[in-house]
């Protein structure tokens, strides 16, 4: 089975560490993992720190740069990449929005993880993400 995980990471904390540990566990079970990281141009260090940690754990990563809130080229590249896997597992609001807005996203086998947030601003996005799911 081939699984793609998609995340637009924040500070390397709970959700990010959970994704990394989950990917490590799947690899140990023989699952082929592709870890796609959305790098936002307004704060690229978040994605770069996440990728550095993922690669230190032996995980393969691919970075897709987001050039705005809703980057149509990113959505297209995401859909093309997701067509090569059996399951797309998205983590968080931005990953969910991009995955659902990709052309022909109804063709994807999609799994969604809504990670809880600790402040009101992020909590609004998580509630919206659960609504979209």
Image (cartoon, rainbow, N blue to C red):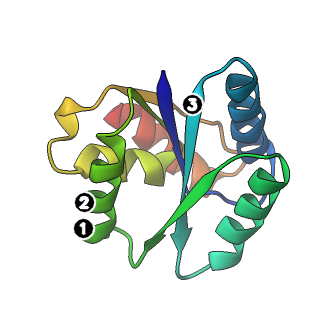
The one nearer the camera, 98 or 3, is: 3
> Could you classify mark 1 by the number of other residues whose Cα lies within 10 Å: few (under 14), some (14-19), or many (20 or more)?
some
Q: Secondary structure at mark 1?
A: helix
- Residue at 24% of width from left, 50% of height from top? 101
Task: State the image quarter where residue 111 is shown.
Answer: top left
Residues at circles 2 and 1 in contact by the CB criterion of under 8 Å: yes
Q: Position of residue 103 (x, y in %)?
A: 16, 50
Q: Earlier in the sequence, mark 3 or mark 1?
A: 3
Q: Secondary structure at mark 2?
A: helix
- Residue at 43% of width from left, 72% of height from top? 66
Task: State the image quarter where residue 75 is shown.
Answer: bottom left
> Could you classify mark 3 by the number of other residues whose Cα lies within 10 Å: few (under 14), some (14-19), or many (20 or more)?
some
> Could you classify mark 2 by the number of other residues whose Cα lies within 10 Å: few (under 14), some (14-19), or many (20 or more)?
some
The one nearer the camera, 62 or 66, is: 62
Q: On the picture, is 118 further left or further right than 37? A: right
Q: Please name the residue that numbered disc 3 is placed on.
A: 32
Q: Which mark is residue 72?
A: 1
Q: Is residue 116 above or below residue 37?
A: above
Q: Is residue 132 above or below residue 79?
A: above
């Amino acid at each position: 089975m081939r699984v793609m995980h998609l995340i637009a990471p924040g500070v390397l904390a709970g959700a990010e560490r959970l994704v990394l540990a989950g990917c490590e566990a799947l690899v140990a079970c023989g699952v082929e993992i592709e870890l796609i990281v959305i790098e936002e141009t307004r704060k690229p260090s978040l994605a770069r720190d996440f990728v550095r940690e993922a690669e230190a754990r032996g995980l393969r990563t691919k970075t897709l740069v987001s050039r705005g809130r809703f980057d149509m080229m990113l959505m297209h590249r995401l859909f093309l990449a997701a067509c090569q896997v059996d399951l797309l597992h998205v983590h968080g609001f931005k990953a969910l929005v991009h995955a659902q807005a990709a052309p022909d996203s109804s063709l994807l086998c999609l799994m969604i993880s809504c990670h809880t947030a600790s402040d009101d601003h992020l909590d609004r996005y998580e509630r919206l993400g659960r609504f979209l799911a």
